[in-house]
Image: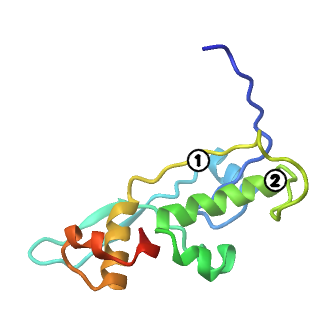
């Protein structure tokens, strides 16, 4: 396979700090941690586990209710970051006459399956995943 050149033209992220890209890098360089501890009153043993949360992230506002409603949380976060990178690169978010055949982006979400199964259960009214093959064809 030959060598390929790649140009990074824009950056985007959803930050647990709640700010924009510049704010993220300032806090990162200052050594501020975004990791917090989740403390519970679980019985018999309370938990204190590290976690990261993006409290200012509103998928409906950033992506639109319809698009956000079709995605799990991880996909919402990465799509929002991709839109920010797209904007940072100076590309229009809406379609134009320009060919985009050589543009690309890549991402994945291994955590979407539980969300998808829960959503299909809500839509199809079935508890057993093997029954999803009988869902309306529009969902397949």
Q: Is residue 85 left or right of residue 33?
A: right
Which numbered disc flags the more N-terminal residue, 1 or 2?
Answer: 1
Q: Is residue 105 visible?
A: yes
Q: Is residue 71 left or right of residue 19?
A: left
| Residue shown at the point (37%, 70%) measured from the top left | 115
The residue lying furthest to the top in this view is 2
Q: Is residue 18 left or right of residue 7?
A: left
Q: Quadrant of residue 117?
A: bottom left
Residue 54 at x, y = what percent? 54, 68
Secondary structure under tag 1 reads loop
| Residue shown at the point (66%, 13%) measured from the top left | 2
Q: Is residue 71 left or right of residue 127?
A: right
Looking at the image, residue 138 lies above or below residue 23: below
| Residue shown at the point (32%, 66%) measured from the top left | 114
Q: Quadrant of residue 47?
A: bottom left
| Residue shown at the point (85%, 47%) measured from the top left | 99
Quarter of the image that includes the N terminus: top right
Identify the residue position indicated by label 2 in the image.
88
How many marks on residues?
Answer: 2
Estimate how packed mark 2 is, as few (under 14), some (14 to 19) or many (20 or more) residues with alpha carbons within 10 Å. Answer: some
Identify the residue position indicated by label 1 in the image.
31
Identify the colour scheme used: rainbow
Residue 41 at x, y = what percent? 22, 79
Mark 1 or 2, which is nearer the eye?
Answer: 2
Residue 91 at x, y = what percent? 85, 54
Looking at the image, residue 136 lies above or below residue 105: below
Q: Are marks 1 and 2 in contact (CB under 8 Å)?
A: no
Q: Nearer the viewer, residue 96 or 61?
A: 96
Q: CA distance from mark 1 to mark 2?
A: 25 Å
Q: Nearer the viewer, residue 48 or 68?
A: 68
């Amino acid at each position: 396979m030959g060598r390929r050149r790649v140009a990074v033209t824009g950056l985007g992220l959803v930050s647990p700090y709640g700010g924009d890209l510049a704010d993220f890098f300032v806090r990162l360089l200052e050594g501020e941690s975004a990791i917090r501890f989740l403390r519970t009153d679980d019985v018999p043993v309370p938990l204190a586990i590290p976690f990261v949360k993006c409290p200012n992230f509103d998928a409906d506002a950033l992506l639109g209710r319809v698009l956000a409603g079709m995605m799990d949380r991880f996909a919402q976060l990465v799509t929002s970051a991709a839109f920010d990178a797209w904007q940072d690169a100076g590309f229009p978010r809406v379609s134009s006459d320009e060919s985009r055949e050589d543009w690309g982006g890549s991402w994945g979400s291994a955590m979407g399956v539980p969300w998808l199964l829960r959503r299909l259960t809500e839509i199809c009214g079935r508890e057993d995943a093997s029954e999803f093959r009988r869902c309306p064809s529009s969902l397949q």
